[in-house]
Amino acid sequence: MINENLKHLDLQDVVADKISIDEFEPKTGEKENVAVFGFYVTEKSVGDDLANFIDKSAFNIRDVEVTPNPNPENYYMVFLEVDRTPEMLDILTSVSKDVQNIAGKIAWKAKPLLSDNTFDLNDPQLVEYIRTTPEEYETLEDYNVRKESEHQQSIIEFICTNSNATKCSLENNMLNLYDTQNHIKLEFVKFGAGKPTLEEAGLDKLAIDYDFDRHLIKTLESMRGSLNIIPINRNVIFHDPNTDTVLVAKPC
């Protein structure tokens, strides 16, 4: 039975600290127009109470619904659907604060569709992964395709801008570098900030090996421009000392 007169802390310890954002399909409209927030609770009756509490709020909410069955983690979910507008996050923040009146202090963690990570509700990074207008909305697939394209373009710009290569390309994970006399083909490994990228590639604690493929290293030295060429464990590190950015590649 729904409790229509919830009191302070009536739902303490039965509302989880996580919130889903846009991971589920809306029922009241198209996903580019309607955002879905999901709260997690331990019991169906708790979900009914929470849904009723939210439904009586003064916020502009299109619909509130409780799942009839628990998810694989044994949580029931309370879904809120709101118009996809710049005010949608303000609504979520306000609702979350109101929920704490009946559930106690909660350090909310939000999981948006476009990221594998969770964020505090007041974390500025969260906004980067939420689309607040229909025009900006993108599916996870579209987002991943766009980010991969941007990543590849940043790699090409890194090489072309900082080296003496007259042409460079990255296709099917293969990096091609050209100058007037040479064509170097390398397998792309990693790209990003210096130390973390080398750690991810397992190259942060290995010694420099200048005896490794001397002809290749000599050719790359002639094309390096402002980059440092560092051979480590049969990998080639292109290092920009100005930004401490590295590109890791290896001969095919």
Image (spheres, grey):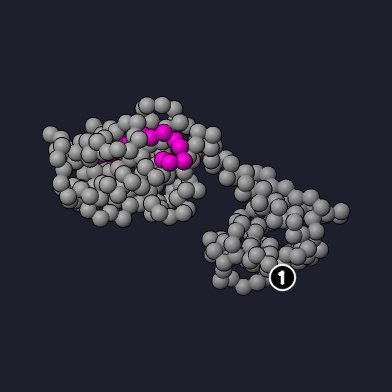
Magenta stretch: includes residue 80: yes
Of residues 41 and 244, the one nearer the viewer is: 41
Can you identify the residue that label 1 sits on?
Answer: 211
Image location (x, y in percent) of residue 177: 76, 53
Instruction: Find the residue positioned furthest to the left.
Output: 1
Q: Which residues are magenta?
A: 76-88
Instruction: Find the residue positioned furthest to the front.
Output: 58
Measuring 35% from the left and 52% from the top, which residue is drawn there? 109
Q: Is residue 61 left or right of residue 189?
A: left
Amino acid type of the residue that numbered disc 1 sits on in the rendered structure: Asp
Find residue 41 and report its image quarter. top left
Measuring 87% from the left and 53% from the top, which residue is drawn there? 180
Residue 74 in view (yes/no): no
Of the 4 image quadrants, the one containing the N terminus is: top left
Of residues 156 and 182, the one nearer the viewer is: 156
Find residue 72 and report its image quarter. top left
Q: Is residue 25 left or right of residue 71?
A: right
Q: Badge 1 local density, few (<14 within 10 Å), some, or many (20+)?
A: few
- In the depicted structure, whether residue 35 falls above or below residue 98: above
Measuring 35% from the left and 35% from the top, which residue is drawn there? 60
Total label count? 1
Image location (x, y in percent) of residue 145: 57, 40
State whether the magenta stretch is mostly helix, strand or loop.
strand
